[in-house]
Image (tube, helix red, strand yellow):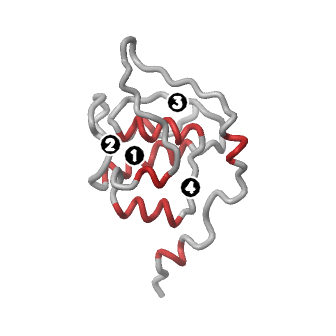
């Protein structure tokens, strides 16, 4: 028996997170000297409509994602605009989604890859431990 996408995504999402507390987290975003073209922060995942492929937009909705965490709010728009990123955030902050959503968008034919020299391969955005 093949399960439908709705069945697979039925019990997922960020229901227990208090996003009002996340909005109080200090975030520092810098670019190269003289760089004033930083992408504006993401207010909600609905703002990605038309910037990511339809299949990815549908899956973000199925996951119940509505408000981004600070790492997602700032890194997703920058990555989708083709900027190189170096990010640091605590465990459980949403880094995996923040890094993989733009990679999936680029591989799926939408978003990302605009410049920055990263090439869209995504290896540099993979969370790692040393």
Q: Nearer the viewer, mark 2 or mark 4?
A: 4
Task: Identify the residue at horizontal 61%, vertical 65% (top origin).
Answer: 12
Q: Name the residue under label 2.
A: 112
Left or right of 121 on screen, residue 78:
right
Disc with the residue nearer the chain's start (1 vs 4): 4
Task: Report the Cα–Cα distance between label 4 and label 3.
Answer: 22 Å
Q: Name the residue under label 1.
A: 102
Disc with the residue nearer the chain's start (1 vs 2): 1
Q: Which of marks 2 and 3 is in front?
A: 2
| Image location of residue 126, percent across then percent down | 47, 40
| Image location of residue 103, percent across then percent down | 38, 46
Callout 4 secondary element: loop
| Image location of residue 74, percent across then percent down | 50, 35
Task: Report the Cα–Cα distance between label 1 and label 4.
Answer: 17 Å
Q: Name the residue under label 4.
A: 66
Disc with the residue nearer the chain's start (3 vs 1): 3
Task: Report the Cα–Cα distance between label 2 and label 3.
Answer: 17 Å
Task: Identify the residue at horizontal 27%, vertical 37% (top origin).
Answer: 114
| Image location of residue 122, percent across then percent down | 37, 41
Is there CB contact under 8 Å for labels 1 and 2?
A: yes
Q: Nearer the viewer, mark 1 or mark 4?
A: 4
Q: Mark 3 points at which residue?
A: 87
Res 54 → quadrant: bottom left
Is there CB contact under 8 Å for labels 3 and 1?
A: no
The answer to which of 110 and 24 lies nearer the viewer is: 24
Res 15 → quadrant: bottom right
């Amino acid at each position: 028996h093949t399960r439908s996408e709705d069945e697979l995504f039925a019990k997922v999402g960020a229901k227990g997170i208090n996003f009002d507390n996340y909005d109080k987290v200090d975030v520092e975003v810098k670019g190269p000297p003289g760089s004033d073209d930083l992408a504006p922060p993401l207010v909600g995942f609905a703002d990605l409509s038309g910037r990511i492929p339809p299949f990815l937009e549908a899956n973000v909705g199925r996951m119940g994602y509505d408000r981004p965490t600070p790492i997602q709010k700032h890194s997703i728009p920058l990555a989708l605009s083709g900027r190189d990123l170096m990010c640091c955030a605590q465990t459980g902050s949403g880094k995996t989604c923040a890094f993989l959503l733009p990679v999936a968008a680029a591989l799926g034919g939408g978003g990302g890859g605009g410049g920055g020299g990263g090439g869209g391969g995504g290896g540099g955005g993979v969370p790692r431990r040393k």
